[in-house]
Amino acid sequence: MFIFHLSEHLVATLLLVAVGFVGVWLAERWLGGSPTPVLFILVVAALLRVLLLPLPPSLSDDVNRYVWDGQVLDAGLNPYVLPPDDPELTPLRNELWEGLPHRDVATVYPPLAEILFAFSAALPASILTLKTALVLLDLGSCSLLLMLARRWRYPPERVLWYAWNPLVTVEIAGMGHVDALGVALVILTTFLLALPTRRIVTGTLAAAGAVLAKLVPLLALPVWARQSGRSRVFLAGALAVTLAGLLPVVMTSGGIPPGLVEYGVSWEFNGPVFEPLWRALDRIDLRDGVEKGLDRLKDQTGNHDFWNHFYPFNYPQFWAKLLLSIGLLPTLIWAWRTDDTARSMRRVFGSVIVFSATVYPWYALWVLPWAALNRHVAWLALSALLFLSYLPRFLDVPLYPWIHALIWLPFAALMLARRRWSTR
């Protein structure tokens, strides 16, 4: 059926998404300037998600991997050291296993996410159960965002850009991405610390939970520490709980989980700066220059074994990732020093996206709550443009340069225009 297979009707899907974004824009204009019925916003948000729940994971099959990880955990085995193709997991192989992506890579998901996977896998209709849980978490995010908007005196209709956003509804209710769990805990932490009597203890637990759901909120800890008014206490508590949650994973994996290492080293897709940067480094033949430098160091020091360790990392994609990691630090410091919490959170998660080598459409879920409150046009437009990144996979067209340019050049132009307008 047409509605159940978005990937088979991708052009029509993109047109419907465009209509959805126009609808959000019209609804915001209609509700603006008048008392906004909060219940109406939440009811429509719930309806949109319920309508998309029956969709199979046709644009992304990550939810199949979530349920598989849950089945491995329920069997008393360790998904951090056993990739799906491991012979030890042969008794678990089923129809779900046959369609899994990256079966040679162990899981990359933190322990709180894995607990949710295990819970869902133990119940009937596991994929639908997991998607329903994520939808409920996401509706909680919408409710908390409305309360934050009221507390911070933002127009409540701005929350529509998250609550009714087609990217949010498709990627969570339709495709079932676990990012909904992390985003909900991020918003919950921010809300608890925004209350008149800051809930530092519960805020600390929520912050640690966010990191244990997906590691990226670790970069938001300085923002929350500043918001809490008791920076050292908050940071010490959040890091202690996080380390306690990660310790069993590190111990059973013998260090950093191999799947996470594989992701950091090998995953590359649609990075806004990464894609042109590594190609530029390749064009100037950086690899040859570095290799000659390593050869010279070997001759000068006589320590061949030590310098030989660096040769496998001498390729343009690695150098691009290293440069982007260095460039990320000053932008994070700038974000952490921003007084406005919503703006600071937007800059933290936005910086991660801009400097990342991998940007799937659902990664925008992290920045959208704060972009919605700030009504940041560039990020809101990007949430629509990121749907174009599905074209290379399903229509057999290359991502770079034209699809990449269609996504990121309008975003860059809107960022520059906003910057110029705000400066003037």
Image (spheres, rainbow, N blue to C red):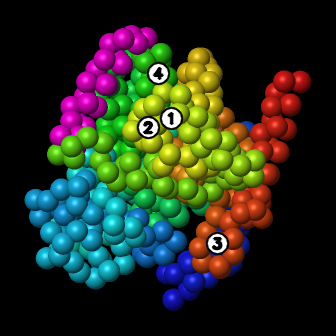
**Looking at the image, is mark 1 or mark 3 nearer the viewer?**
1
Q: Where is residue 141, by image quadrant?
A: top left
First-in-chain label (2 vs 3): 2
Name the residue that disc number 2 marks. 304
- Going by the image, does 110 lie left or right of 45? left
Q: Amino acid at mark 2?
A: His
Q: Amino acid at mark 3?
A: Pro
Name the residue that disc number 4 marks. 222
**Looking at the image, is mark 2 or mark 4 nearer the viewer?**
2
* Label 1 CA crowd tier, 10 Å (few <14, some 14–19, many 20+): some
- Going by the image, does 424 lie left or right of 198? right
Name the residue that disc number 1 marks. 298
What's the magenta region?
Answer: 229-251
**Circle on res. 392:** 3
Q: CA distance from mark 2 to mark 1?
A: 5 Å
**Circle on res. 79:** none
Q: Position of residue 352 (x, y in %)?
A: 56, 39
Q: Residue at 21% x, 36% y: name it.
A: 247
Q: Residue at 86% x, 31% y: name it.
A: 421
- Going by the image, does 417 lie left or right of 407? right
Q: Position of residue 25 (x, y in %)?
A: 72, 53
